[in-house]
């Protein structure tokens, strides 16, 4: 990671999302600001211990021909990318090539599991009907590099770097950080980056249930995901994608693109503590925050909003709350978690939440954390936004992403009119 003075100013010029809150950023933002949980009974998960999930309303949509042949995660990604590029002033999914040098466009996408639904379906076919029943598109639908960055680069016809990151639930945020690094070093002029996952599958649901990570409130699914709440008991599986378009500020200005926010700093660390549990004191997260703020040339007292990872698991929320309390004891920022409304979208979460953090900076509004009634003794002391949105115009915000394996990624975003 280089110091701020050594790299060009990087701005976000487009955002896109597909979530259980709706198709697109506007619908997702409305759902979030309403504080409405989207978890429902999921017939596809019947027979698993926790048959609830947060699914996007139109999983069949994709802005390419024969999109039905792709895994859901890929379809989500392509749809979110189309929205993000359109906001950036680029029409890249039509018959006419976009006005860019394809060799100077990077595609960096994260996912935790790739096209896992394709893999599960293929395995069932193999066991029930033999190898002749497998589709020749099995590998191209499942392999993580193809189901994410590969298929997006093919759809956009870009020939620059096309890279996949896989750091569990920090994958999307790590992809954004890596894309920013490519821009900072001059390896590309524009980056289409983010995360996608579609892990609401029988195998994934059953496996997560075995770890004890999922909420068991199957009788009240809409209120099951409860980040930082005293009665939290785990997360709800979600699906979706988030995409950001990143450019150097000078390049964006030259083509008249909107500068939605400044990606001022980023950092990644590892806990080296446990395969699934976070460091109880949040030491890895604290280090990532300190490094991201150093890169942004900012002090903790300047942070006015945190889009928390906030999964609703007892251990995860406890560790994150402890880190936030200690880091920002003098000037507590507003804190929100999108997962109460949208569920945990796994490798897509960091990208969706980065896009939502951009929206917070643009609107001046911090959305509430859905399903939060009261903090527990281990999560009290943070300024959690609850009940209704809070209008307070933050200028510097952080987006936290944590993942199994001890991965921590923090993105620091500034309002474009902030110093």
Image (spheres, helix red, strand yellow):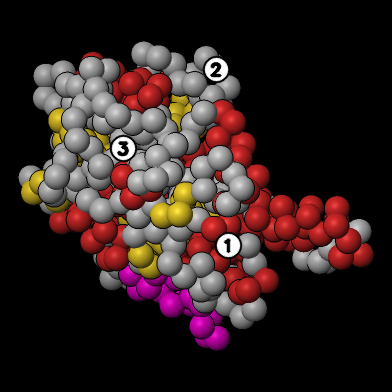
**Residue 155 seen in the current view:** yes
Question: Which of 157/274 is in front?
Answer: 274
| First-in-chain label (3 vs 1) | 1
Q: Please tell me which residue is depicted at 33% across the width and 31% down the height of the picture.
A: 232
Residue at the (40%, 14%) spot, across then down: 280
Q: Nearer the viewer, residue 49 or 266?
A: 49
Q: Which residues are magenta?
A: 82-100
Image coordinates of residue 53 in percent, x first then y, are: 46, 51
295 displayed left or right of 362: right
Q: Is residue 163 above or below residue 135?
A: above
Which mark identifies residue 226?
Answer: 3
Q: Mark 2 packing: few (<14 Cα in 10 Å), some, or many (20+)?
A: few
As drawn, the label of residue 274 is 2
Magenta-drawn stretch, dominant element (helix, strand or loop):
loop
Residue 393 in the image: x percent, y percent? 10, 47
Q: Mark 1 — residue?
A: 72
Task: Specify few, some or many for label 3: CA neighbours under 10 Å numbering under 14, 14-19, or 20 or more.
Answer: many
As rendered, which of 6 and 14 lies closer to the eye?
A: 14
The Cα–Cα distance between marks 3 and 1, rounded to whole angstroms, is 26 Å
């Amino acid at each position: 990671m280089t110091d701020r003075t050594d790299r060009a100013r990087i701005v976000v010029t487009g955002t896109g999302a597909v979530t259980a809150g709706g198709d697109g950023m506007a619908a997702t933002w409305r759902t979030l600001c309403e504080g409405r949980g989207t978890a429902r009974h999921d017939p596809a998960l019947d027979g698993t211990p926790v048959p609830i999930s947060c699914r996007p309303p139109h999983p069949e949509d994709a802005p390419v021909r024969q999109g039905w042949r792709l895994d859901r995660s890929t379809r989500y990604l392509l749809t979110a990318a189309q929205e993000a590029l359109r906001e950036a002033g680029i029409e890249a999914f039509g018959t006419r090539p976009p006005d860019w040098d394809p060799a100077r466009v990077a595609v960096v996408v994260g996912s935790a599991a790739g096209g896992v639904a394709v893999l599960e379906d293929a395995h069932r076919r193999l066991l029930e009907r033999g190898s002749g029943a497998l589709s020749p598109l099995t590998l191209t639908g499942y392999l993580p590099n193809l189901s994410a960055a590969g298929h997006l680069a093919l759809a956009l016809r870009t020939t620059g770097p096309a890279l996949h990151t896989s750091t569990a639930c920090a994958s999307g945020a790590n992809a954004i950080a890596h894309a920013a690094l490519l821009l900072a070093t001059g390896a590309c002029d524009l980056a289409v980056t983010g995360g996608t996952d579609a892990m609401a599958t029988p195998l994934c649901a059953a496996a997560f249930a075995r770890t004890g990570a999922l909420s068991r409130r199957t009788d009240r699914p809409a209120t099951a995901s409860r980040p930082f709440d005293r009665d939290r008991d785990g997360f709800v599986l979600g699906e979706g994608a988030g995409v950001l378009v990143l450019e150097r500020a000078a390049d964006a200005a030259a083509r008249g693109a909107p500068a939605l926010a400044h990606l001022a700093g980023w950092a990644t660390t590892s806990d080296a503590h446990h395969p699934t549990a976070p460091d109880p004191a949040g030491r890895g997260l604290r280090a990532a925050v300190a490094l991201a703020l150093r890169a942004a040339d900012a002090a903790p007292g300047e942070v006015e909003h945190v889009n928390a990872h906030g999964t609703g698991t007892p251990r995860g929320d406890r560790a994150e709350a402890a880190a936030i309390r200690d880091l920002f004891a003098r000037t507590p920022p507003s804190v929100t978690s999108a997962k109460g409304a949208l569920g945990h979208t796994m490798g897509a979460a960091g990208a969706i939440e980065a896009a939502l953090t951009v929206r917070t900076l643009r609107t001046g509004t911090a959305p509430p954390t859905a399903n939060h009634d009261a903090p527990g003794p281990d999560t009290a002391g943070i300024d959690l936004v609850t009940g209704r949105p809070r209008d307070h115009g933050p200028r510097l915000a952080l987006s936290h992403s944590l993942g199994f394996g001890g991965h921590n990624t923090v993105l620091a975003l500034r309002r474009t009119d902030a110093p």
